[in-house]
Amino acid sequence: MSAALPASTLAPDDLSALCLGLAQRAKAASRVLTTVPTAAKNRWLLLAADALLAHQDELIAENAKDVAAAPGFGLNAAAIDRLTLNPKRIAAAAEGLRQVAALPDPVGEVREATERPNGLQVLKVGVPLGVVFFIYESRPNVTTDAAALCVKSGNAVILRGGKEALHSNTALHHLLSIELVRAGLPANAVQLVPTTDRQAVGHLLAMNDLIDLAIPRGGKSLIQRVAAEARMPVIKHFDGVCHVYVDAAADLAVAERIIVNAKCQRPGTCNAAECLLVHAGVADEFLPRAGAALQAKGVELRGCPETCRRVPGARAATEDDYRTEYLDLVLSVKVVAGFDEAVEHIATYGSHHTDAIVTRDIGAARAFTRRVDSAAVMVNASTRFNDGFELGLGAEIGISTNKFHARGPCGLRELTTYKFVVTGDGHVRE
């Protein structure tokens, strides 16, 4: 694979000019994309999916360079897992591209249509946002997700991946670029920032005249920096402190299966459970069995005194533990007196990301979905389902805990806005 690697450092004037060029080319490409037919965008997605599979060996070879260097960047086991590409993940990425191709195009979608008493025809029509600046860390499969969603929704995207995934992202972008040209789309619809210099991010975040939206996806420090420096709107979440509450009326076998999956299936993701809340009425029966199942998977438990009394090997939790997104095989646990205390705990320590209840009590389930103010609320299901692919969006560009514009997994529709198209017959306002 003959993709050139980005330069690591540039002189300040050169870096500023480079970033300006990226943004200007993206803006020009975005104007073309607003008129590109759905069929052309879908053709690119299908070509790109085939290219991923055809070049699987080369992608894995480039990814191996990043994985080998990962310990030197301080990545833990969970972070290295996020970084790693393998045939299964490449196949999933290709399937994600195909799923996006199969989704309805939100561009040109008539979202509302009314006729005013005076005969004016009023349409609310979906349109692209324009240019998206997407900043992310060590998950190379996100490169294809972001590119797919942005282009299908009519947006140009500037990708800025982390240095940890340098070889992987460069190789993926190389394939995507080749297929853009083959599909007859603007070559600059998907661009990769060709430097690992962190100052490039600051330059681009200041270009609100050319870039319409910034989306950071990674650690809290990255997201805080983007939120502080961006002059354009930001879709974000700071933390994924996700809870599973086991209610008094829970099926305990189901609850055990859910918490083990929510914590262990991929502990390094933002929708992995970080805290288990257990109703006191079932703690004696549930905690020993669930604790043993979690510990068998290598999970370190940090619990309240009632937890430690019931689970051998559990460590005492601190106040900070209940606020921590571990992104690892560590879980905080608390026994709560009842439903109200569980909801209050989530309100106090949660991050409005994903929270779940396990219960057979319909009333408790409905109350939980009303009272828990999170982007996704799960009933008898793992927190790991708060994912664009799993929820039918084809893929996602991130999960938002914002309350304006977009919330939860952000797919195609969340990358568009709308305009009013008003048609009259010589109408004038009196």
Image (cartoon, helix red, strand yellow):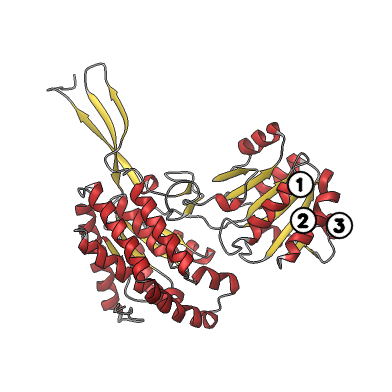
Q: Earlier in the sequence, mark 3 or mark 2?
A: 2
On screen, residue 361 versus residue 27, left or right, reads right
Q: Taking the image as drawn, is residue 206 in sight?
A: no
Q: Which mark is residue 88?
A: none
Q: Position of residue 280 (x, y in %)?
A: 82, 46
Q: Taking the image as drawn, is residue 5 in sight?
A: yes
Give the SS element for disc 2. helix
Quadrant of the rendered image containing residue 248: top right
Residues tagged 3 and 1 counted as in contact (Cβ below 8 A)? no
Quadrant in the picture for the N terminus = bottom left
Quadrant in the picture for the C terminus = top left
Q: Which residue is mark 3?
A: 310
Residues tagged 2 and 1 counted as in contact (Cβ below 8 A)? yes
CA gap between label 3 and label 2 equals 11 Å
Q: Which residue is mark 1?
A: 252
> Residue sitting at 23 percent across and 58 percent down?
27
| Amino acid identity at mark 1 | Leu
> Residue sitting at 24 percent across and 55 percent down?
30
On screen, residue 419 versus residue 103, left or right, reads left
Q: Position of residue 371 (x, y in %)?
A: 63, 38
| Amino acid identity at mark 3 | Arg
Quadrant of the rendered image containing residue 290: bottom right
Q: Position of residue 284 (x, y in %)?
A: 86, 50
On screen, residue 382 versus residue 46, left or right, reads right
How many tags in the picture?
Answer: 3
Quadrant of the rendered image containing residue 199: bottom left
Q: Is residue 91 above or below residue 250?
A: below
CA gap between label 3 and label 1 equals 16 Å
Q: Which residue is mark 2?
A: 290
Q: Is residue 19 above or below residue 30?
A: below
Residue that extends furthest to the left in the rendered view of this protein: 426
